[in-house]
Structures are given as structure tokens and as C-alpha cells.
Amino acid sequence: MSTGLEQSIIFFVCLVVAVVLHEVSHGVVAAMFGDRTAADAGRLTLNPLPHLDPFGSVIVPAMGALAGLPVIAWAKPVPVNPNRMRNPRRDSLVVSLAGPASNFVLMVAAALVARVMWDSTSGVQLYSDLPLAIRIAFSFAAVNLFLGVFNLLPIPPLDGAALIERVLPREWLPA
């Protein structure tokens, strides 16, 4: 039987891993197109510390948790310089898609892992009664689904805003 604290810890760890992989994917794809800004800044690392934003990763989530409000958080965006890319407009679009795409790939992989581990003959009907490994895989899938969809919203500074900017005709950009 899982506790609320246990599930919160599972969710938090899954969120940290998903956000780090999301941000690193932006930097890796940018490097593939010639922009080494993230690598030069030491941001192509799986260590979560360089990705933490003191305000968005610590203060705001702590205030929300203490106040009993929904917890929102964000990481520092990986630095990308489109001017260092071979085809800045096209390559920036791919870099923007890399984060949400990584979340969707991780979601599918985690969901498949959860499905392979789940034994439908076990008679378990409640999420809280599932084995820990299945709850972790399921939580990781859910977190990545949420992050992937959320980051595609066309609201700055989310990836969706960059996508809208990059698919609009050039002459519309000043407006």
C-alpha cells in the first residue's frame, strides 16, 4: 500500500528526471546543428543541479506545497544560439521540438515497461496496490505525457511559442 508521501516522492523524482532529459535533448539537438552553446555552458549533463532555477525550481514549488496549492515549477532553459546553427530558422524549429519529442518517447517507453510488468491476473484493481516498480513506470509515463503536452502550449517561454514563431511566414514575425 503506497502512502501520499511515497507517491509524492515518486512523482518528484520522475519530474526531475523528465525535465532534465527534456532540457538536455534541446542542447544535444542544437549541438547536432552546430550550436555548442549548451555544451560550452556545461548544460549537457544529467546532473540536475545545473538545470535548477532557484526561483522556479525551489522557491515557487515550496511556497505552493506549503500553501496547499498546486505545485508548479520550471528549470533553467538550456542556452541555444540559433546564429551558430547551419540553417537557423529550420534548425531552431527542430531544437524546439526535441524537448517535447523526448517526453513523448520517454512516455511510450515507460508505459510499455509498466504494461510488460503488469500481470492482469493478479486481481489488483487499485493503483496504490500495484507493485512499486509498476507505479514508478506509470508515474514516469504520466509525468512525461503532461510535460510534453504542456510544453507544446503556444505560450512564451514554452516550446510551443517557439514553434508558432518558426512556422509563421517571416514577414509576419515583426507583428
Image (cartoon, rainbow, N blue to C red):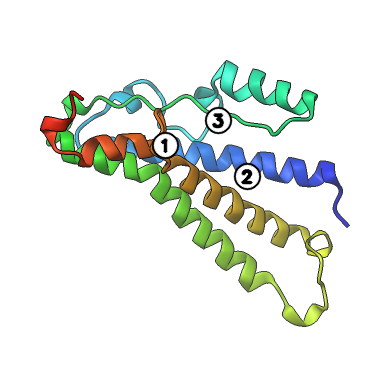
Q: Is residue 164 above or below residue 142?
A: above
Identify the residue at horizontal 76%, vertical 41% (top origin): 8
Gap between marks 2 and 1 measured at Cα: 15 Å
| Residue occupied by mark 2 | 14
**Residue count near mark 3 (Cα–Cα under 10 Å), binned few <14, some 14–19, many ≥20:** some
Q: Quadrant of the N terminus?
A: bottom right
**Residue count near mark 2 (Cα–Cα under 10 Å), binned few <14, some 14–19, many ≥20:** many
Q: Is residue 33 above or below residue 49?
A: below
| Residue occupied by mark 3 | 48
Disc on the earlier residue, 1 or 3: 1
Residue 90 placement (x, y as % from top left): 17, 41
Tag 3's secondary structure? Answer: loop
Disc on the earlier residue, 3 or 2: 2
| Residue occupied by mark 1 | 24
Say left or right for 32 vs 118.
left
Residue 66 placement (x, y as % from top left): 79, 24
Foreground pick, 131 / 82: 82
Q: Name the kind of residue labelled 2 in the image.
A: Cys
Gap between marks 3 and 2 measured at Cα: 12 Å
Identify the residue at horizontal 50%, vertical 62% (top origin): 108
Residue 144 placement (x, y as % from top left): 54, 49
Q: Name the kind of residue labelled 1 in the image.
A: Val
Identify the residue at horizontal 59%, vertical 29% (top origin): 73
